[in-house]
Image (cartoon, rainbow, N blue to C red):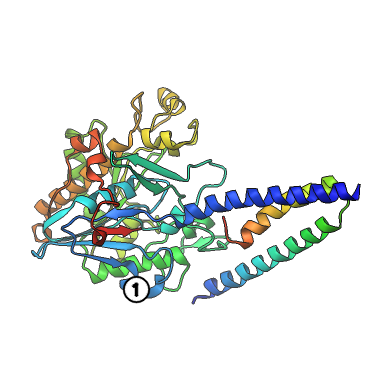
């Protein structure tokens, strides 16, 4: 494997880890919030993170 | 109040799951759909591109290579489509050839789908249809409609600047996933570079004499309805251009030299890095024009658009267009006829590379309908059905 391929692999893994981190953070605030409008916004924000983690593009 | 918030949250999550399921199903269906091809009974062998180099083994771009070997000494030609999967004529023409061809001298290699990864992609913000179909009477042929560049699920991230190997020329970063900017390829590069590398190994190992890369272009683009050739193909390319412009094409097919300083394209690099002479064919596809109207399957297949016509009225296009548009039959017919004419003229100019083919319909027959030349995979013998 070339250096570029290895770097791409590392960045890809980091990106998925970052997506998972933010998804968990959104789920956490979604559970905690008592504001209905905030809860709806958090649900909408979750969708692309879930699709990305499932590799559905 | 607390109960009300909880109920809203549950409903919102349920709705989001439904939306994700629908979107996920549609994305997955597009990515995993397999396109059937009923190969001609005269086919000799079907190989994988990885049989020539294992650098793409196990990847989405390890495509089928359909081989017709007459057993009679002569020339060898390679034809491929779907370098750019938003240019559907390439895959349609190649499928039609694979389903009908008989070779009586020389050898013919066909690759329907050179960059399958790009066919699983789409262009963000362009509202492209996911699939396109052709009514064949027995049912419909269905192909994926993709993008110009490979899928980011297969090759990501792109570099800040794509540096072409081996020239060192700087290109747009997205072109590292554009298979017609990464020739002659790189064994340890990203997916498209490795695909080109494997294809170059095939060209060298099989001693291929002619290579034809099928494309389409927007009418606003100057390289339109033309043959682009490496300088070693200028005689054949010029004769084909004059011959077809005289008869039977109603719109002239011009010819262009491949620019020597523009790297990564098949018509430049294959000729520079092998004995093979490469050609690229272009035909008008109004759906690619920036000023088009509604972007749907009808526009893709019929090539009719009043906004593109209006641009033509103002002399802003490099190709004529009228109410009849650029129907898919005419576009496929032009490419297939240009292939046959290239073989014919190459036979005359390079008789040691003679290739004789049968079974391919004429320009007039193809312009009428493509339906008789695609076969039903459901009723075909199982050993003749392959999937791209």
Residue in the image at 44% along x and 45% along y: B131
x, y (%) of residue B154? 50, 63
The residue that mark 1 highlights is B53
x, y (%) of residue B81? 33, 52
Quadrant of residue B362 in the image?
top left
Badge 1 marks a residue whose secondary structure is loop
x, y (%) of residue B215? 35, 47
Q: Is residue B134 above or below residue B195?
A: above
Q: Is residue B242 above or below residue B158?
A: above
Q: Taking the image as drawn, is residue A20 in sight?
A: yes
Q: Is residue B290 above or below residue B211?
A: above
x, y (%) of residue B145? 43, 47
Q: State the residue in front, B308 or A44.
A: A44
Q: State the residue in front, B284 or B47.
A: B47
Answer with left or right where residue B5 lies relative to residue B291.
right
Residue at the right extreme? B1
Answer with left or right where residue B270 lies relative to residue B315.
left
Q: State the residue in front, B306 or B255.
A: B306
């Amino acid at each position: 494997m070339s250096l570029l391929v290895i770097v791409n692999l590392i960045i890809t893994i980091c990106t998925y880890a970052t997506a998972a981190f933010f998804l968990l953070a959104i789920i956490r605030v979604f559970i905690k919030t008592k504001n209905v409008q905030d809860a709806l916004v958090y649900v909408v924000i979750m969708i692309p993170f879930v699709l990305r983690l499932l590799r559905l593009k | 109040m607390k109960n009300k918030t909880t109920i809203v949250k549950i409903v919102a999550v349920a709705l989001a799951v439904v939306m994700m399921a629908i979107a996920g199903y549609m994305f997955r269906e597009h990515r995993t759909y397999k396109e059937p091809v009923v190969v001609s009974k005269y086919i000799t062998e079907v190989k994988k591109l990885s049989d020539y180099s294992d650098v793409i083994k196990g990847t989405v771009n390890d495509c089928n290579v359909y081989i017709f070997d007459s057993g009679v000494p002569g020339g060898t030609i390679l034809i491929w489509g779907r370098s750019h999967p938003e240019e559907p004529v390439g895959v349609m023409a190649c499928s039609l050839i694979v389903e009908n061809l008989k070779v009586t001298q020389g050898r013919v290699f066909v690759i329907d789908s050179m960059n399958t990864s790009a066919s699983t992609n789409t262009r963000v913000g362009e509202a492209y249809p996911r699939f396109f179909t052709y009514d064949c009477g027995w049912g419909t042929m269905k192909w994926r409609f993709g993008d110009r560049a490979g899928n980011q699920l297969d090759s990501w991230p792109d570099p800040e600047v794509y540096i072409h190997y081996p020239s060192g020329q700087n290109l747009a970063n997205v072109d590292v996933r554009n298979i017609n900017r990464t020739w002659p390829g790189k064994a340890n590069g990203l997916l498209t570079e490795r695909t080109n590398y494997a294809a170059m190994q095939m060209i060298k190992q099989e001693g291929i004499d002619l290579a034809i890369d099928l494309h389409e272009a927007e009418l606003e683009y100057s390289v339109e309805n033309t043959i682009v050739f490496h300088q070693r193909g200028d005689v054949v390319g010029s004769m084909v251009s004059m011959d077809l412009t005289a008869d039977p094409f109603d719109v002239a097919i011009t010819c262009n030299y491949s620019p020597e300083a523009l790297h990564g394209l098949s018509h430049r690099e294959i000729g520079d890095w092998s004995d093979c002479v490469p050609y690229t064919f272009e035909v008008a596809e109004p759906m690619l024009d920036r000023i088009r109207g509604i972007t749907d399957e009808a526009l893709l297949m019929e090539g009719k658009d009043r906004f593109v016509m209006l641009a033509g009225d103002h002399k802003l296009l490099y190709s004529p267009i009228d109410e009849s548009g650029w129907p898919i039959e005419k576009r496929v017919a032009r490419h297939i006829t240009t292939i046959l004419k290239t073989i014919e003229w190459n036979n005359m100019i390079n008789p040691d590379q003679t290739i004789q083919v049968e079974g391919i319909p004429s320009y007039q027959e193809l312009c009428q309908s493509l339906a008789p030349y695609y076969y039903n995979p459901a009723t075909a013998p199982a050993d003749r059905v392959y999937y791209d």
